[in-house]
Image: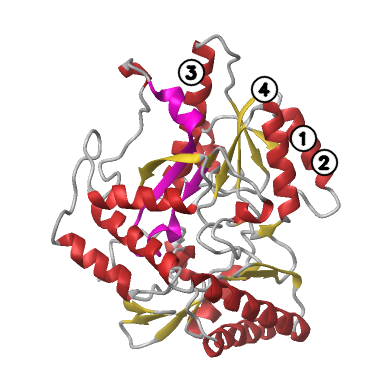
Amino acid sequence: MTSPVWHPFTQHGLQEPIPLVERGEGAFLHTADGRRVIDAISSWWVTTHGHAHPRIMQAIRDQTGRLDQVIFAGWTHEPAETLAQGLRAMVPDTLTRVFFSDSGSTSVEVALKMALGYWLARADAGGEPRHRIVVMEHSYHGDTIGTMSVGERGVFNRAYEPLLFDVTRVPFPEQGQEQATYDALAAACRDAAAFVVEPLVLGAGGMKMYPPAVLAEMRAICAASGTLFIADEVMTGWGRTGTLLACEQAGVVPDILCLSKGLTGGAMPLAVTMASEPIFEAHWSTDRARMFFHSSSYTANPIACAAAAANLAIWREEPVAARIDALAAMQRESLAALAGAHRIRNARQCGTIAAFEVGEGEGYMADIAPRLLAMFRDANVLLRPLGDTIYVMPPYCIDRATLDEVYAAIGVAIARL
């Protein structure tokens, strides 16, 4: 019987096989046909400590026996309060407020609405109105209407163009051309409400990387003009770039911070948008019409919050930073060996993320991608190339021998091409 499931980012007309995964443990997935598959992309960048981490699984089990769900509008619960306090202790002091949502896309959507609400309050008080959002070329922030609007236009969202609002785009800071980015950003920020950016690494845009000094300069430009700085750390947060937040490496503190993916260690869907006190105060009023109008039915789901609180405990009590450093070192060595043995382009690394290009530079829709996907699947390695960009982003528990298997599969695939 044909499955009725419609999978994301899947062209069912190609009739590619879709493996049935039965369980996960550590860096591995186990399929119904008995295969052990290495999860080399952390199941779409979410699984940080490994699948079925005992502490997170136990926290979920414990919470299911107490409280599964409750409305969060005007009510609260212990897992959300514990998580919010834990997050406050981990991030810069100026990020005082924690707003819960359910995915990376919605966390950025919330950030955009917070920014526009902030400027509306200023305009109501006699200040200047600002509405324009500034973004970086090649960025990707999600698949809701607002986040598609601030992402790169193209094959991802061509069908939905009539729904999207206009934004101002600045060029990606290619090495040696950073000044063009600075100049464009300074011009755009004269009357911009907010600049939203993926710090250090543009994920779905092709794992494009830029140095911390560029991030610091862009933050300074925004601060000089009063433009709100929104850091989309949905992918880059939770250690992926080598530090808890990518912004740390540039000494940057955003006005609004978006977190998801690794927030629960990858076990449950949850997101937060953390805001500075002026953002919150702009919505604080005795006038009910001035409240922040955003929610979902499952805002701050207690089970998801319990999983996230357990994740924070792991960060506090286990040597997570040492595991990240060890993985970054292994990635550096493996990438160098691969580049020495095969013809690849633009080999690069940021923390635990390694990436490079193969083929003829055709981009996201490169014909090479389905061939690579099939070869990796046959080799029992979960890698999902972004067109002609191959990247490796495994959970932090992966060991040297398993990572060697990943790079061996990549080497075989490149040789076959």
Residue 16 lies, with reference to residue 149, above or below; the image says below
Horizontal placement of 314 versus 345: left or right?
left
The quarter of the image holding the C terminus is bottom right
Q: Around disc 1, counting alpha carbons within 10 Å, would you say few (fewer than 14), some (14 to 19), or many (20 or more)?
A: some
Q: Is residue 282 magenta?
A: yes
Which mark, residue 180? 2
Give the x, y percent position of residue 56.
31, 68
Q: Is residue 131 left or right of residue 272?
A: right
Residue type, label 1: Ala
At 31% from the left and 18% from the top, the residue drawn is: 288
Tag nearer the camera, 2 or 3: 3
Find out whether the residues at labels 4 and 1 contact each other: C-beta distance under 8 Å: no
Q: Residue furthest left?
A: 65
> Which residue is disc 1 drawn over?
184
- Number of the front mark, 4 or 3: 3
Disc 3 marks which residue? Answer: 121
Q: Residue 72 at x, y = what percent?
A: 25, 39
Residue hosting label 4: 191
What whole-number distance in Å separates the C-alpha atoms at marks 2 and 1?
6 Å
Q: Secondary structure at mark 4?
A: loop
Farthest residue to the bottom: give it.
401
What number is the disc on residue 269? Answer: none
Q: Quadrant of residue 61?
A: bottom left
Residue at 75% from the left image edge and 75% from the top image edge: 344
Name the residue furthest right.
176
Position above or below: 102 against 376: above
Q: Which residues are magenta?
A: 257-284
- Give the color scheme: rainbow, by chain, secondary structure or one colour: secondary structure
Q: Residues within 10 Å of mark 2 (few under 14, many from 20)?
A: some
